[in-house]
């Protein structure tokens, strides 16, 4: 019995989801921001590959799949930057609140 390329790719995809899930949920909070920055860089590389796939494919299905891949990777990059910005805001020193004297002079 011969295993098709589609089945092999599907198995790899499912294993990548499983491993990725366990890797992400076992990251300590201190490492979250640096890992997000690396993830954004990887997603940027994925966008380049997806643009190549969309542009160099002759069939309509491949072009549509490449365009969808570009859109999803772009959402991932922009969302990653927003999450990274929020995480960095958590580490900034908070300004002391000005004491209010309650109207007394």
Image (spheres, grey):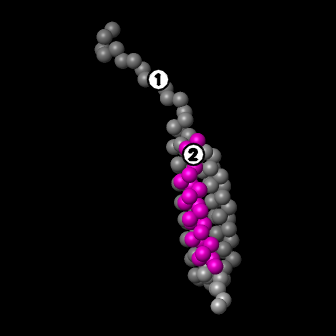
Density class for disc 1 (Cα within 10 Å; few <14, some 14-19, many ≥20) is few
> Secondary structure beneath disc 1?
loop
Question: Of helix, strand and loop, which mostly describes the magenta segment?
Answer: helix
Q: Quadrant of residue 40?
A: bottom right
Q: Find disc 1 in the rendering and name its residue.
A: 96
Placement of 102 over or under 49, stated as above or below = above
Image position, residue 12 (x, y; %): 62, 72
Image position, residue 62 (x, y; %): 61, 79
Placement of 89 over or under 81, stated as above or below = above
Instruction: Kindly tell me whether residue 63 is visible in this rendering.
Output: no
Residue 82 forms part of the magenta stretch: no
Q: Find disc 2 in the rendering and name its residue.
A: 28
> Secondary structure beneath disc 2?
loop
Residue 25 forms part of the magenta stretch: yes
**Residue extent of the magenta highlight:** 8-30
Q: Residue furthest front?
A: 1
Placement of 63 over or under 76, stated as above or below = below
Q: Residue furthest left?
A: 103
Q: Residue at x 64, y 85 (%)?
A: 4
Image position, residue 49 (x, y; %): 68, 68
Image position, residue 41 (x, y; %): 66, 55
- What label sits on residue 25 in the rendered view? none
């Amino acid at each position: 019995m011969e295993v098709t390329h589609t089945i092999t790719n599907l198995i790899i995809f499912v294993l990548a989801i499983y491993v990725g899930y366990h890797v992400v949920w076992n990251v300590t909070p201190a490492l979250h921001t640096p890992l997000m920055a690396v993830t954004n860089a990887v997603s940027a590389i994925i966008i380049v590959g997806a643009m190549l796939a969309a542009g160099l494919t002759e069939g309509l299905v491949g072009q549509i799949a490449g365009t969808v891949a570009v859109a999803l990777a772009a959402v991932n990059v922009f969302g990653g930057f927003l999450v990274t910005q929020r995480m960095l805001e958590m580490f900034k020193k908070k300004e002391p609140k000005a004491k209010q004297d309650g109207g007394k002079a």
